[in-house]
Image (cartoon, rainbow, N blue to C red):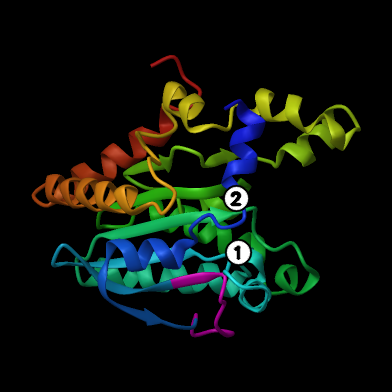
Amino acid sequence: MDAYEKVLAARAKGRPTAMEYINGIFTDFQELHGDRRYGDDGAIVGGIGRLCGIPVTVIAQEKGSSTKDKIARNFGSPNPEGYRKALRLMKQAEKFHRPVICLVDTSGAYPGMGAEERGQGLAIAENLMEMMTLRTSVISVLIGEGGSGGALALAVSDEVWMMENSIYSVISPEGCASILWRDAKKVREASQCLRLTAEDLLEMGVIERIIPESDKDFGTAYMLLQTWLKKAIDDRKDVPVDELLEKRYRRFRKFGSNE
């Protein structure tokens, strides 16, 4: 598939949403709600579960399945209270030394007037800053779309992985085409220029791993992801926190360099 075909695959109807990943990978998941400031946001699901018996905090962007569910979850575009809920759960995980696993799937943070009035930019910026120094292991997996700062707010992690047909970019191909060529129809060319596929990003060192999508029901992918997540957590179990934070810092500092 070319880059644009990957974009279509990442957005495809029937592609598993975050809740399906949670149900396929984790057990005993208990969802927690609210940011303790304004309200709850259905676009971000967060809670505590077990990964092969290990207690973990799971935070995910959920687009919804049915039409009613999609509307209730704002089609996976979080409001600031969603990002603040995510940060609250991350700080809770830090307190109890639980690993954090983030599932990223959003076209971007919600740009509405209400979201801006409630501090959308600040909420995202706080997540970026706090995740960089979060004193527990963090792994993020892009399972569909990874759009702009709305995705990055859950992806400042020790490692970032991508499903084979997911995408990750600073802007949507349509937005890029409108800016560069003033023509949204040039979306295929924009997709190629953005280098937003998992293969491109692995080559550039932006991500660490690609998870293959070998069957339509994603059952094999869930099993593989579960195995790799457990190994990644086990590998970090005895790593001193200061060393973990230094590696995370170095991971992001090398972007754009020749290292």
Q: Which residue is mark 1?
A: 76
Q: What is the magenta range?
A: 35-45
Q: Which residue is mark 2?
A: 149
Residue 205 image point, x, y percent: 41, 26
Q: Earlier in the sequence, mark 1 or mark 2?
A: 1
Residue 206 image point, x, y percent: 44, 32
**Circle 2 SS class:** helix
* Identity, as a three-letter code, of the amino acid under mark 2: Gly
Nearest the camera: 212 or 166? 212
User: Residue drawn at (27%, 37%), measured in percent from left and top?
Assistant: 247
User: Residue drawn at (63%, 39%), measured in percent from left and top?
Assistant: 7
Horizontal side, residue 71 vs residue 155: left or right? right
User: Residue drawn at (40%, 41%), measured in percent from left and top?
Assistant: 213
Nearest the camera: 156 or 15? 15
Hey, which residue is sitting farthest left in the picture? 238
Residue 126 image point, x, y percent: 51, 60
* Identity, as a three-letter code, of the amino acid under mark 1: Gly
Question: Is 232 located above or below residue 48 in the figure?
Answer: above
Residue 54 image point, x, y percent: 15, 65
Question: Is 252 located above or below residue 220 in the figure?
Answer: above
